[in-house]
Image: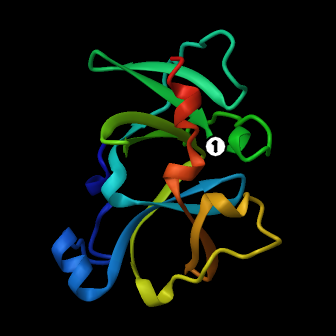
């Protein structure tokens, strides 16, 4: 299931890159993790899939859940809860894997993140994004690109390049 499947008339209108830049808005995939809401830039999202069989890889950090085979490609899976030092995610029927396309140093990599639930695709005006707090967040401040609101709740917008340990994944 891709991110577009979560789009309906009750959600904000989908914008392409050019429109988003002209209007000062960005789109984020909003998901829950340990009863908190987080967002990643929708431009990084390749697809969303149900949680399935994840193969454990020996000698990896505890936040690397393992790998999956996605149409012949090996995709490493990061347990974001464990990455944020909040314990291992308890997988349930709503758990899913968000596949992200991350480009670092000119090289593109697909990485999956395990989340509790996907909530929405949300258009957020850049003026509605507050800077990361210097203290009090449940996530290290360098992982946070900003804070916004969704349904009267705060949403932590992640800086994926800093959140995901791409150097650790090179061993996979």
Horizontal side of residue 9 vs 136, given as left or right: left
Q: Quadrant of residue 56?
A: top right
Q: Please report the residue visible at 49 percent of the width from the left and 87 percent of the height from the top.
A: 128
The residue sitting at 63% across, 57% down in the picture is 143
Residue 28 or residue 170, whichever sits in front: 170
Name which residue lies at 35% across and 49% down.
Answer: 45
Coordinates of residue 94 in the picture (x, y in percent): 54, 43
Q: Nearer the viewer, residue 47 or 134?
A: 134
Which residue is at the front of the view, 124 or 135?
135
Quadrant into which the N terminus falls:
top left
Q: Is residue 85 left or right of residue 70?
A: right
Identify which residue is drawn at 36% across, 34% down.
109
- Check the image and report above or below for 157 versus 78: below
| 20 lies left or right of 166 | left
Residue 17 on image: x %, y %: 21, 69
State the image quarter where residue 110 is shown.
top left
Q: Residue furthest top?
A: 58
Place residue 25 in its image quadrant.
Answer: bottom left
Give the image location of residue 74, x and y in percent. Answer: 39, 18
> Does residue 73 appear anywhere in the picture?
yes
Crowding at mark 1 (Cα within 10 Å: few <14, some 14-19, many 20+): many
Residue 118 sits above or below residue 108 on the image: below
Tag 1 residue = 80
Callout 1: helix, strand or loop? helix
Q: Is residue 11 visible to us here?
A: no
Hey, which residue is sitting farthest right in the picture? 136
Q: Position of residue 144 (x, y in %)?
A: 61, 64
């Amino acid at each position: 299931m891709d991110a577009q499947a979560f789009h309906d008339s009750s959600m904000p209108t989908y914008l392409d890159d050019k429109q988003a830049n002209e209007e000062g808005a960005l789109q984020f995939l909003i998901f829950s993790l340990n009863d908190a809401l987080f967002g990643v830039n929708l431009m990084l999202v390749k697809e969303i899939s149900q949680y399935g069989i994840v193969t454990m890889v020996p000698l990896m950090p505890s936040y690397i859940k393992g790998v999956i085979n996605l149409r012949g490609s090996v995709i490493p899976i990061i347990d974001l809860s464990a990455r944020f030092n909040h314990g291992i995610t308890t997988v349930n029927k709503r758990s899913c894997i968000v596949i992200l396309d991350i480009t670092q140093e000119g090289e593109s990599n697909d990485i999956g993140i395990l989340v509790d639930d996907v909530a929405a695709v949300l258009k957020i005006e850049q003026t509605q994004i507050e800077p990361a707090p210097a203290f009090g967040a449940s996530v290290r401040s360098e992982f946070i690109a900003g804070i916004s609101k969704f349904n009267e709740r705060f949403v932590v917008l992640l800086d994926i390049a800093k959140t995901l340990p791409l150097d650790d994944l090179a061993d996979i």
